[in-house]
Image: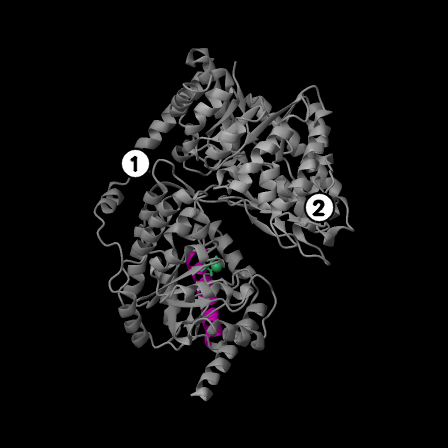
Amino acid sequence: MSKNYIVGFPRIGEQRELKKALESYWANKSDFSEVQKVASELKHRHWEYQKDAGIEQISSNDFSFYDNMLDMAVTLGAVPKRFQDLQGEELYFAMARGNQNAVAMEMTKWFNTNYHYIVPELSLEDSYKLNANKIIEEYKEAKAHGIKTKINIIGPISFLALSKRVDRGDTFELYSKILPVYEELLREIAELDDTVTVQIDEPIFVKDLEPKVLSLIKPTYDKLALISSNIKIAVVSYFEHSKEATKILVNTPVWALGLDFNHGEENLESLSDIAASNKVLIAGVVDGRNIWKNDINATIALLNSIAQSVKKENILVSSSCSLLHVPFTLRYEEKMNSEIKNWLSYGVEKLEEIVLISKIFFDGKESLNAEEKALFEANQEANVSRSSSPLIHDKKVQERIQNITKLERDGAYEERIKIQKELLGYKDLATTTIGSFPQTPQVRHARREFKNGNLTQAAYTQEMKNYIDDCVAFQEECGIEVLVHGEPERNDMVEYFGEQLQGYGFSQNGWVQSYGSRCVKPPFIYGDISRPKPMTVDWITYAQSKTDKIMKGMLTGPVTILNWSFVRDDMSRGDVSKQIALAICDEVDDLQNAGIKMIQVDEAAFKEGYPLRAAKVSEYEDFAVRDFKISVSSARKETQIHTHMCYSEFNDIIATIEAMDADVISIETARSGNELLKIFAQVGYKQEVGPGVYDIHSPRIPSIEEIVKQIHSLLEVLPKEQLWINPDCGLKTRKYEEVKPSLKNMVEAVQIVREEFETVK
Ligand code: GLN
Ligand code: ZN
């Protein structure tokens, strides 16, 4: 009696087949029928993998050509007006990516993951109409293939909460229009089979919900669960606990609740409610968000403790969330250190874990056959090896952490900035950039060839230096005041540092879907972090040697490195980021000792690390601020520390930003005028600020006039003594043809504004 379950499976394919098919179709190199063929092969293969592994509850409709939220919008007929002349795949991909006549729908992060969903657009005047085709067809396809699936859909409350209104107002005002479409959907599903299980994802239940939203849970699920007696509904949430919603759901006629016990330990407090209601508990115990092998013994212990409250026969062993968030299979990791590889588990390997755990939990270890026994023993050995391996545990790092006394730099901001302004002599409204310059085909080629061993170290270094020469010369020519080296040696702002830090691992094929056809390959932190040698000093000092102006050194901050990696789970995130902070701190010191006077420590991902629950925010902020400060604690008073964050919402976190105590922060503002800057003025923010004066996400070249206008609007909020002038973000995705005129216009605009101040005087 093994009972197991899986929330969802990745769809892009182990060799990113779907990505390739989509991109070829988008480039008009193939027909949509080719994409459909690949999609169908993938679905079948993925169902087979799950079935072969012994998974009992396999999903349909976890596949998507682009995104499940977009699929749900199409299912509900939530098609924005600007696309209404289109149909079929043309409509679908236009919604996702835009076309000649209409901009794409907005895309945003799926909770605290790096997956992005398409934000549905709703409006009171629109009507909604069911289009259940995809859901029905996928169910039939699986059935024809011999697999009776459960059907995955996104729940109405999460759908509304994650959508936006195009006509001002609250999306929940559309509740009475949307819910009937869900009811109709369930009625169609009920026709499909004698009994059908529907998994309704309600991840929004893990957030702090307003009473208004909480009050919708009972009526919604009372209704949906009674649509048809042959439908069993499982309401699933993930990434955190959902205690409040669980309390309500146990009093509705749903069949099961899916809870995440890896990332929502507080769900344990819901067990007595679940037990009392006799609901089925889908226990998420195999982490769908991380790449570490499950510790099966520990998981069995957890399940046993759950079984003290909830009847064993009511428990299903499951992944904590869809495996969409982990790479596909370890099979293609041929180059990885075999000891480290043995600690990992990707999607396909997690299937095996779920099945094995459920066997042991329900039938006991005695019931395992020889092969399963061997798997179990290997699992234990891997966990023992991981907890004691010298690859992970570095005494020196641990001692240094224990004995750390310097937690922040010397001197208060007021004292530092006075010294810096005198020494560095930059003007008000000083011009600079965020770090990267266009990544030319040549530079990419050189990096690739060097990596593949086709380019010598000397030739590679020369290529990079040539780039830096040009980049510096260009900045001089256009009159930028604080220069950068342009980051030609970096493929990615985290990977570049990860590759040079001890304790960091990289995969060959660890792709995870980020949005649509785009995948990322996050590096992973497996052990104590240290810095064997300087990481950026040669490049930055070389760049400095090419100019008399100030060369700003460029580093990535500890919190961003943490947030864009898979992180070891045998230590708290805060402890890991503290180790990274010390490595960056050493780099800061080496840079200043080599004569670099300004150093930027980017915290591009600071905001996305925020927890889903307010109760956990202060814990995050405490270590995030602490570790940023540690990372620059070596900076002397006269060394100016910059940071950069690439988003535009600071209202909630302004006190935290202030506490980081960077001398200068550059932020993204071009698209919001001076709105977001106002909060800096409101709180009396003292440090200097570089609000982006033009948007780098588009190839458009901003005119001098519009930049002047933007600077004027910034000056309405903060005085010129406090402002720097720079683009919104790094320029790596742009072309030199765009960047050159844009930066020239930026510099000209600053001249104009400075002259205005002169004439006033
Ligand atoms: N220094 C980095 C760059 O310019 C910062 C990138 C970012 O903020 N995302 O590319
Ligand atoms: Zn940025």
Q: Which residues are magenta?
A: 456-476
Which of the pair 384/61 is nearer the observer?
61
Which of the pair 725/307 is nearer the observer?
307
Q: Considering only vertical position in the picture, is 186 above or below 408?
A: above
**Mark 1: which secondary structure?**
loop
List the residue tagged with mark 2: 92
Amino acid of disc 1? Pro
Magenta segment, principal secondary structure?
Answer: helix
Cα–Cα span, label 2 and label 1: 51 Å
**Mark 2: which secondary structure?**
helix
Task: Return the x and y of residue 484 as percentages of the image width and height.
Answer: 43, 67
Task: Return the x and y of residue 154 as percentages of the image width and height.
Answer: 61, 37
Regarding residue 567, the answer to whether it shows in the image is yes
Which of the pair 352/575 is nearer the observer?
575
* Render colour scheme: one colour
Amino acid of disc 2? Tyr
Q: Could you classify mark 2 by the number of other residues whose Cα lies within 10 Å: few (under 14), some (14-19), or many (20 or more)?
A: many
Task: Return the x and y of residue 584 as percentages of the image width and height.
Answer: 33, 54
Relative horizontal placement of residue 245, taking residue 582 as reference (left or right): right
List the residue tagged with mark 1: 390
Which of the pair 695/757 is nearer the observer?
757
Q: Residue at x 44, y 23 (%)?
A: 272
Task: Return the x and y of residue 245 as percentages of the image width and height.
Answer: 51, 34
Determine if the magenta segment contains residue 639.
no
Relative horizontal placement of residue 157, taking residue 579 as reference (left or right): right
The image quadrant that residue 700 belongs to is bottom right
Regarding residue 141, the answer to whether it shows in the image is no
Q: Residue at x 74, y 48 (%)?
A: 90
Label 2 vs 1, first from the N-terminus = 2
- Please say if the residues under marks 2 and 1 sit with CB atoms less than 8 Å apart: no
Relative horizontal placement of residue 744, taking residue 407 as reference (left or right): right
Determine if the magenta segment contains residue 465.
yes
